[in-house]
Amino acid sequence: MFYKRIIPYILSFVLLSGSIYYVADTQEVGTESSASTPTQIAVEKPTQEIRGVWVTYMTLDVSGKSDKESAFKEKIDTVISDMKDANLNTMVVQVRPFSDAIYPSRYFPWSHILTGTQGEDPGYDPLKYIVQAAHENEIMVHAWVNPYRVSTKNTPDELSDDNPAVKNSGMTVEVNDGVYLNPADDNAIKLIADGVRELVRNYDIDAVQFDDYFYPPDCGEFDQEDYERYCESADSPLSLEDFRKENVNKMVRAAYEAVHQTKQNVMFGISPQGNLGNNEGLYADVTKWCKEQGYIDYICPQIYFSLDNPALTFEDGLSDWLSTEKHDDLSLYIGIPAYKAGTDADGGTWLDNDEILKTEVGISREVKADGFILYSYDSFHNDDNAQEVQNVIRYLNE
């Protein structure tokens, strides 16, 4: 049965870390409460298996179309039709890829994928259409957010004047040909949390999901001044590595609180790197999020490997996550790489047969994961991936 929740907004005083904040539509909560681990909030979870697909901002891009609104809605209708044919029930749709938005926001400009120009109003609400169309077809919507990214390698090619990185450049950093919100900046953390709260308050989404981008890889010493200021104020300073981890932890706690202070039964999840060790380089403390209460409601590691990948097999990667300690309320979904099927990725091992995706979905079910999510929807219409995807669809419809 389709998972539905009708929960009123929380209009109460919430005691957090010795301070009381009033949560209402007209007032945003500060980040002070995220200084210590919050109390876990019980969430009503879907009773059925999550069978999902990621829908990227590239899929949604209609900037080159003449009738952009009609083109966008037609894309969403096609995605939903394909999902129903595949017996999928969860759309993880990228709603905020570059500190921008595919919905009207008081914090972020309109995304360039809607009109070709960041900040230009498309004249309709794309996310409202997505949620309405999905729910009418008994499909859940997880709003996918990239929390820190502003631009990478000139995408988007120009930021609008109302982009938070332009309005307050002091909370951004430039690293590896990209612009990012500074994970060490409290204003950036508050912006991310306020943006999450706005999403949950204004739309009947079923979850918010962060992807696997945290600290930029190979980020050097861009936060040296932040770290030195921290060390001067701390009695027993953390190492630089732990300082960075705690900055991300603080942001994740703030986002979790923002979701559940607004609507208790909307889930908050993260989809990290599938190779457990790779998350260290991004300062993503995934084992802490899984183990301790008050960070996430679900984890969806991107186990994007073939069954015989010489570097790390799907089953070995999955085993690492299964053995990771988890709090009692955590759901585990498995990210599966439809985009690699039928290609020469992973040392050519995806060419061994055309039932690798089907097998990986089956393994996820055998280990009693709570569901799986395929990356990405474009694989449904890619010649290389076509046979494997069709085999999965037949399997899901058995």
Image: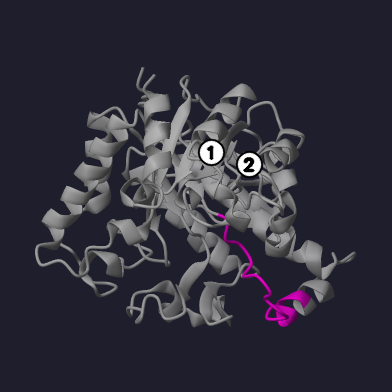
Q: Quadrant of the N terminus?
A: top left
* Residue under label 2: 307
Along the viewing direction, whichever of 384 and 334 lies nearer the viewer: 384
Instruction: Examine the residues drawn in magenta and state their main secondary structure.
Output: loop
| Residue 247, position as x, y percentages in the image | 68, 62
Vertical placement of residue 194 versus 238, above or below: above
Crowdedness near tag 2: few (<14), some (14–19) or many (≥20) residues, C-alpha within 10 Å:
many
Closer to us: 299 or 34 = 299
Q: Label 2 amino acid?
A: Leu
Viewer-proximal residue, 383 or 316?
A: 383
Q: Is residue 188 above or below residue 34?
A: below
Q: Residues within 10 Å of mark 1 (few under 14, many from 20)?
A: many
Q: Secondary structure at mark 2?
A: loop
Determine which residue is flagged by label 1.
356
Callout 1–callout 2 Cβ contact below 8 Å: yes
Chain-order first, disc 1 or disc 2: 2
Image position of 268 with respect to 329: above or below: below
The answer to which quarter of the image holds residue 187 is bottom right
Magenta residues span 212-227
